[in-house]
Structures are given as C-alpha cells and as structure tokens.
Image (tube, rainbow, N blue to C red):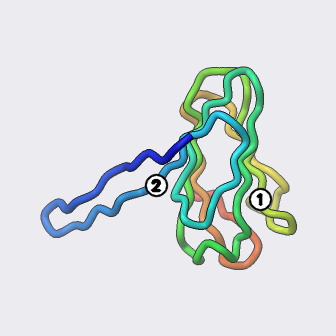
C-alpha cells in the first residue's frame, strides 16, 4: 500500500532517525530497506516474509505489527533455510500484537520483543 514515516529530528542532542514502515493488507515480502510492516488482516491470515538473514546487518531490527482486530493472524515466515528463534514461523494473532526481530547476520531471526 505505501510507506508510513515515523519520527525524525533531534531532541537535546539525541538523534531520531526516520523509520520506514510498510502498511499492507495482503501478503508482503519485506525488502532489505524496510524497517517494519503494519499489517491489517481482516478475517484471513496474512503472511509477512522476512528477507534472508544475511541481507539485514547483524543487530538491525525489523518490527511487524498486526493493526486490526480481525480474526486473521499475521504469520511471520523467514527466508528459505532461515529460522525465527530456530522455528519455521512466528505468529501475531491479536490486535496490536508486535514482534521485533533482529538478524544474527547468518541464518536466524531473534525475536527481541513481543507485545
């Protein structure tokens, strides 16, 4: 659908950088430059495909958030051969569920937070 810009500027010497969140209502494959995905599922499950773990610098994060109260879950699926916390998928099922994932730079996405 399009990008949503979140934050920019500075607060007393602390730099705030702009983050690019893709707002989607259909299955989406994360691009290497994306910072996150805001997914609206409705009643049908939707898939967010993560890029290969080697395409995101080790330590860089990617946030995925389910925006609506519809019954469809967001299924987070890593690139073929990669894992999320050593599993084949992750799921965000309730409204405003959020997962923040960090690449190990090799083949695993580490979930550093789930709200």
Residue drawn 54% across the image and 65% down it: 33
Other residues around mark 2 within 10 Å, as few (<14) / some (14–19) / many (≥20): some
Give the x, y percent position of residue 13.
16, 69
Q: Report the side of 25 relative to 45 (left or right).
A: left
Q: Nearer the viewer, residue 78 or 33?
A: 33
Lower sequence index among marks 1 and 2: 2
Split into 4 quadrants, where in the image is the C terminus? top right
Q: Report the side of 72 relative to 97 (left or right).
A: right
Disc number lying in front (1 or 2): 2
Residue drawn 22% across the image and 60% down it: 9
Say how many tags the image has: 2
Relative height, residue 81 to residue 42 (above, below): below
Tell me whether the residue at label 1 lies in contact with that at label 2, contact meaning CB atoms closer than 8 angstroms. Answer: no
Q: Nearer the viewer, residue 20 or 101?
A: 20
Farthest front residue? 1
Quadrant for residue 40, please give it.
top right
Whether residue 67 is visible, yes or no, is: yes
Other residues around mark 1 within 10 Å, as few (<14) / some (14–19) / many (≥20): many
Residue drawn 60% across the image and 65% down it: 102
SS category of the residue bearing label 1: loop
Give the x, y percent position of residue 52.
73, 69
Q: Nearer the viewer, residue 10 or 102?
A: 10
On residue 78, the disc is 1
Split into 4 quadrants, where in the image is the N terminus? top right
Separation of marks 1 and 2 at Cα, in angstroms: 20 Å
Give the x, y percent position of residue 11.
17, 60
On residue 20, the disc is 2
């Amino acid at each position: 659908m399009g990008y949503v810009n979140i934050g920019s500027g500075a607060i007393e010497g602390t730099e705030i950088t702009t983050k690019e969140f893709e707002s989607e209502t259909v299955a989406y494959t994360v691009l290497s430059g994306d910072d996150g995905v805001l997914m609206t599922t409705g009643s049908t499950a939707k898939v967010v495909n993560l890029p290969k773990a080697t395409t995101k610098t080790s330590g860089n994060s990617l946030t995925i958030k389910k925006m609506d109260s519809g019954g469809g879950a967001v299924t987070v699926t890593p690139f073929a051969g990669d894992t999320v916390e050593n599993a084949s998928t992750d799921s965000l099922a309730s409204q405003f569920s959020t997962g923040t994932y960090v690449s190990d730079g090799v083949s695993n996405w580490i979930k550093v937070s789930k709200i």
